[in-house]
Image: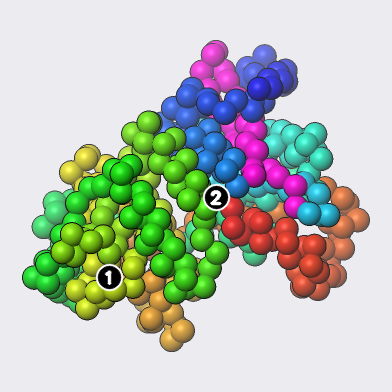
Amino acid sequence: MEHRTVVQSSDYQFRTSTDLDDPAWDRFVASVPGGHHVQTSLWGRVKGVLGWQAVRVVVSRDDDIVGGGQLLLRPVSRFGNVGYVTKGPIIKSGDPTLSKRVIDELRNLGRAYHLRYLAIQPPSNGQAIIHSLEELGFRASWIELAPTATILLDLTQDLAVLMERLKRQTRQNIRRSQREGITVGEGNASDLDTFYRLHLSTSERQKFVPYPKDYFATMCHTFESAGCFCLIVADYKGEGVSSLLLIPFGTTVIAKILGWSGEHGNRRPNEAVFWGAIKWAQEHGYHCFDMEGIDPASARAVLNGQSLPEELRDSPDFFKLGFGGQVVLNPPAYDYFYNSVLRWTYRLFFRSAMVDLPVVKRMLNRLRQH
């Protein structure tokens, strides 16, 4: 545990903290528009399983938290330490001056932890933060720390309205799943083995490296104790064939990750499990359901009234768009190299070439797999 108080002015008190459990900060994040679970100490504990360390800049005024940001950092081979801030910083008032001061403090904090590279991706309502990032030497990055495009469903509508706004094929597939004997229910910690089995099946089919089981076990234990974890499971004849991990946080439920056995696809278990999750979220009083990401190219096509690009018509984006909702674009990530020569070279001359360097590839892979 470490605390460092920085006296910035008579109005604000800045401190840093590495506390593994920071309930006051977590309550602040949940209460502020744009607040996201990846900015909580809960998430910092989960990422610790993968070797990341969480450290926060917290700003208070009259003993009330009014802003801050959580930085995750770790060493990457010979490159040195790298860090990132996802969906932050968070500023209660939206004050651009305070935003800039928090970003500057995060940058200085990275220097204190000997970072070579720092990436910051603002919250969904953080467009105003971009100007401050650019003023402080950050530049737009091609790294996507969090989805820069997603689909949001308004859960304040009646369930019948939500059903009516589904694409016709999606609505038919949900009804088919019911006729074919797919049942959907809320799981609990005891269903984590089922979810992980489905996650492994998905990773094998889609050729990605699965997360370790301890990652999900820690996520379940940490977020469930705060009321921010749920598993929705679709069964066929008593066997779990599809499961969706949800993170309910603030007024939003996020569809974090789907696991599917790859079997009984003709019975449409994935449409069933997503619809079950949407119903669960509405029944529990949440206002928004976040599909947690689609390809930005898909989002731009939809927002421009165009069809999806040919290469994306068989993608998960087409599946998610079937549930209706509002397509939104979120701010991109911005990056910063602490070495001034490297920063200048990277930006002006060798950006594309540097991406192919093995040490830079390792750094980027670590961040992409955050």
Q: Helix or strand or loop: what does disc 2 sit on?
A: loop
**How many numbered markers are drawn?**
2
Q: Dot 1, crowdedness within 10 Å: few (<14), some or many (≥20)? A: some
Residue 202, percent from left and from top: 42, 67
Part of the protein shown in magenta: 51-76
Identified at 52% across, 25% down, the residue is: 22
Q: Residue furthest right?
A: 341
Residue annotated with mark 1: 322
Q: Write down the residue under mark 2.
A: 127
Q: Position of residue 290 (x, y in %)?
A: 36, 54
Q: Residue at x 36, y 36 (%)?
A: 224
* Nearest the eye: 132 or 273: 273
At label 2, the amino acid type is Gln
Q: Is residue 234 left or right of residue 76?
A: left
Q: Is residue 27 magenta?
A: no
Dot placed on the residue nearer the N-terminal end, 1 or 2:
2
Mark 2 crowd level (few <14, some 14–19, many ≥20, 10 Å Cα) = few
The amino acid beneath tag 1 is Gly
Relative image position of residue 255 (x, y in whole percent): 36, 54
In the structure shown, which secondary structural element does the residue marked by tag 1 occupy?
loop
